Image (tube, rainbow, N blue to C red):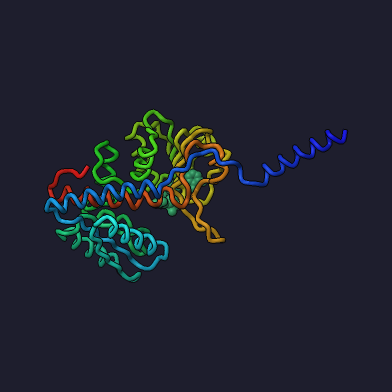
Amino acid sequence: MAASIHFRAGCEMRQYKWMTSTPPMHARLIDGKAIAQSLKLEVRGAIEALVAAGARRPGLAVVLVGNNPASEVYVRNKRRSCEEVGVVSVAHDLPASATEAELLALLRRLNYEPTIDGILVQLPLPPHISGRAVIEAVDPAKDVDGLHPYNLGRLAQREPLLRACTPYGVIKMLQHIGVAPSGMRAVVVGASSIVGRPMALELLLAGATTTVCHTRTRDLAAEVARAELLVVAAGKPQMVLGAWIRPESVVIDIGIHRTADNKLVGDVEFAAAAARAAWITPVPGGVGPMTIATLLSNTLEASVRRQGLKSAD
Ligand code: NAD
């Protein structure tokens, strides 16, 4: 009798521990930092080879309006990464009071500037400036963010030129870990013009059977549970619960948020999702570094095209 009580107490103790501690990690981590580093090394090698052959170094104009602290960090990282790979970055910092007309005038000048191959306008913009007008003002040949309607249209028509950085970064990440989306049941949570929609177009291009979820999706949990490949860009901290994740799926978390206790988290409940998935991206160190690496590779590509050189790949 005593033994059986002891045994039951042991079981309860184990069950209690299971309920209160982090579930065991099952998934393999997708190390975006390392993958981005190898992509940056490739870009650097290609740039050095082009420069050695007499080409001009690629030039990127990085435009920042105002002083949103997160944007300042992103822009600083982008400029530092340019230096790492040998892209010439030219800073254009405008005050928050800059008008839309002033920004558009700057973009017109940069469109005609021969040594500038790429123009990046850091988003979000202050509310008095139309993001749409700004995105459309960039010459599509210099649109290294891949957000101009011409470039998104090319992607929609399966003839991509400059591809949206974050979604293209996700595709490169999947290639790196040997996951081919072709034929997979893919679900994208989020339908914004800069992340969710181009992500869905990339997955469609890669041959996945692609579902896009948004705020009007009736049963998000059921859609997520069907996903063999799940990409989340909903902009809501830890909104996708681990219990929804299909066992052995691939989970890509694009979201990034700072919590009240100063931690970075994504849109997915990480620990519980990692206990079920086969592969998962961490936040930070997942998709974020890939976005910058893809920006650099887009800048190289734009430069190669503009200089009439042979493709660097
Ligand atoms: P957004 O707010 O413009 O769009 C969010 C999308 O998610 C919308 O389409 C909305 O319909 C959908 N959505 C929101 N709540 C939902 C819900 N409950 N159910 C289903 N769908 C829902 O955001 P965004 O610009 O697309 O960015 C998304 C996230 O990705 C943000 O956290 C952003 O910080 C992050 N982000 C990260 C990178 C990176 O490099 N890591 C780059 C860009 C954006």
In the rendered image, the vertical position of residue 137 relative to residue 93, given as above or below: above
Q: Position of residue 229 (x, y in %)?
A: 44, 36
Location of residue 93 (image quadrant)? bottom left
In the rendered image, the vertical position of residue 180 relative to residue 36, given as above or below: above
The residue lying at 28 percent from left, 52 percent from top is: 296
Quick check: 151 left or right of 291?
left
Location of residue 86 (image quadrant)? bottom left
Q: Most extreme residue toward the top, as rendered?
A: 183
Q: How many marks?
A: 0
The N terminus lies in which quarter of the figure? top right
Asked whether residue 215 appears in the rendered view, the answer is: no
Location of residue 61 (image quadrant)? bottom left
Q: Position of residue 221 (x, y in %)?
A: 54, 38
Between 197 and 17, the one lying in front of the other is 17
Q: Position of residue 251 (x, y in %)?
A: 47, 40
In the rendered image, the vertical position of residue 148 relative to residue 91, given as above or below: above
The residue lying at 31 percent from left, 61 percent from top is: 79
Q: Position of residue 115 (x, y in %)?
A: 16, 59
